[in-house]
DNA sequence: GACACCTATTCAACAAGTTGAGTATACGGG
DNA sequence: CCCGTATACTCAACTTGTTGAATAGGTGTC
């Protein structure tokens, strides 16, 4: 249910091609919804057939042509209706948490490795968000941006993403500290 | 993929009935995986047919009989194999974030209401986790618990849940502060 | 030049999550 | 007594997410 509105929300920022959307929704960078190219192209077909978006082919040199999608007035209305509806609660579903929950004494090396990877991914995501943040501010302060922006949603979800990844990093480091107490490993970082 | 291992992980804490598992996995309290009763009963059927769990009927007075499930040695092995595999990255998917991202000036009252609800849900979840935390410690300190516990996963995922809900509350309050700047509402809290 | 990756999109089949109910009895509060 | 909730579980159909590829040409590095 959420994917279609996430796509519509993304198109509020401006027209975009499917490939472009695929990059925005990639699990490694997405900060409000993640999706695969297969999902996105399927949903774009549906949204187009329902009149919520309008696609056009853009010819390119030295690259395959691309299909660019634009939000329609019906799509904007659908978004507003979605915002007015009761909101589903956020659902926690994370394979890493399942591993940590299940880990026995013999599993700690594998869990440590997974935690270290997750921490690294969180660091990279945070760096990317900081980069987006700089681009959003464009030299202004946060307060100035908020005072001037027509829509503050992108800023707020970005801040949410940053908070989330910071908490992620913090938790990973707490976990590693506990693992160090239980089975010390002579490595750095 | 994750649900089955989440169920197996939950059964590490001890045998449990389907109804009991439904409560643990309810979206309002779950801190590593959430699932509906329909999913859980279907997955339990599969796990039983594959030999990862063993179910038995427990007769009760004044209540319908219940089916209680126990982890099998094959189930434990399956869990260990799962822990050793590469870990899928966490995927962000949240309807509330989509609404915030999409919100225009006219949507702010609806967004405010949704944020306030989410903050309340996060507060309740955090209170519940604090309660579980107290039960886990059973009068001991965190350090004492960690020193004595055979498996620290439940403690670690609980801490993760607490951190996550604290970040949630923090973000909601930041969002409300921004909304207050934009369209002040004379209400309390 | 070879190889890895990028650009841009597609497909079918399957797995997981959701919807919209339903069964029947017990319990508790007003 | 009535109503809402709890206990315990079930079903089919649907939507959403995933898998495991695939197409073809361009780009960049070694």
Image (cartoon, coloured by chain):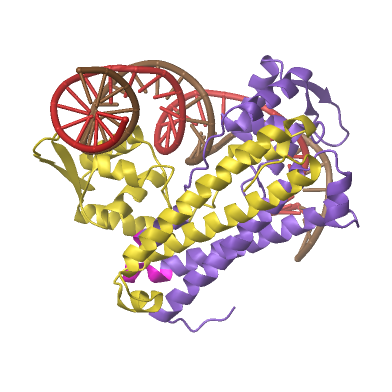
Chain colours: A yellow, B purple, C brown, D red
Looking at the image, which residue is at 70% across and 34% down?
A109
Q: In which quarter of the image is the N terminus of chain B?
A: top right
**Depth check, front residue: B60 or B15:** B15
- Residue at the extreme bottom of the image, as rendered: B186
Determine if residue A7 is in view.
yes
- Residue A168, given in percent of the width and then of the height, sits at 58, 52
Q: Is residue B62 magenta?
A: no
For residue A131, which quarter of the picture? bottom left
Q: Position of residue B180 (x, y in %)?
A: 45, 79
Q: Nearer the viewer, residue B7 or B117?
A: B7
Looking at the picture, how far across and down is residue A141, in whole percent?
Answer: 38, 76
With respect to residue B185, does B176 lie above or below?
Answer: above
Q: Residue at x 79, y 57 (%)?
A: B131
- Decide if residue A111 is on the left or right side of residue A38: right
Residue name at image x 88 percent, y 34 percent:
B61
What residue range appears in magenta?
A: B102-109
Q: Is residue B105 covered in magenta?
A: yes
Image quadrant assignment for residue B58: top right
Q: Which of A104 and B64 is in front in this view?
A: A104
Left of B19 or right of it: where is A47? left
The answer to whether any part of residue A98 appears in the image is no
The quadrant the C terminus of chain B occupies is bottom right
Q: Could you say where residue A114 lies in the image, as x and y percent from the top left? A: 61, 37
Q: Is residue B108 above or below residue C9?
A: below
Name the residue furthest right.
B139
Give the overall secondary structure of the magenta segment.
helix
């Amino acid at each position: 249910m959420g994917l279609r509105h996430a796509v519509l929300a993304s198109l509020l920022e401006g027209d975009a091609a499917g490939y472009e959307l695929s990059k925005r929704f990639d699990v490694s960078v997405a900060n409000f919804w993640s999706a695969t190219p297969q999902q996105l192209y399927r949903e774009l077909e549906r949204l187009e057939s329902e009149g919520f978006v309008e696609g056009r082919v853009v010819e390119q040199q030295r690259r395959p042509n691309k299909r660019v999608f634009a939000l329609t007035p019906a799509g904007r209305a659908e978004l507003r209706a979605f915002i007015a509806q009761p909101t589903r609660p956020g659902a926690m579903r994370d394979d890493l948490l399942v591993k940590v929950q299940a880990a026995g004494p013999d599993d700690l090396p594998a869990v440590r490795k997974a935690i270290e990877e997750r921490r690294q991914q969180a660091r990279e995501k945070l760096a990317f968000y900081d980069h987006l943040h700089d681009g959003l501010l464009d030299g202004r302060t946060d307060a100035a941006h908020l005072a001037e922006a027509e829509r503050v949603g992108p800023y707020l979800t970005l801040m949410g993403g940053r908070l989330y990844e910071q908490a992620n990093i913090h938790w990973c480091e707490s976990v590693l500290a506990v693992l160090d107490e239980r089975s010390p490993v002579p490595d750095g970082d």
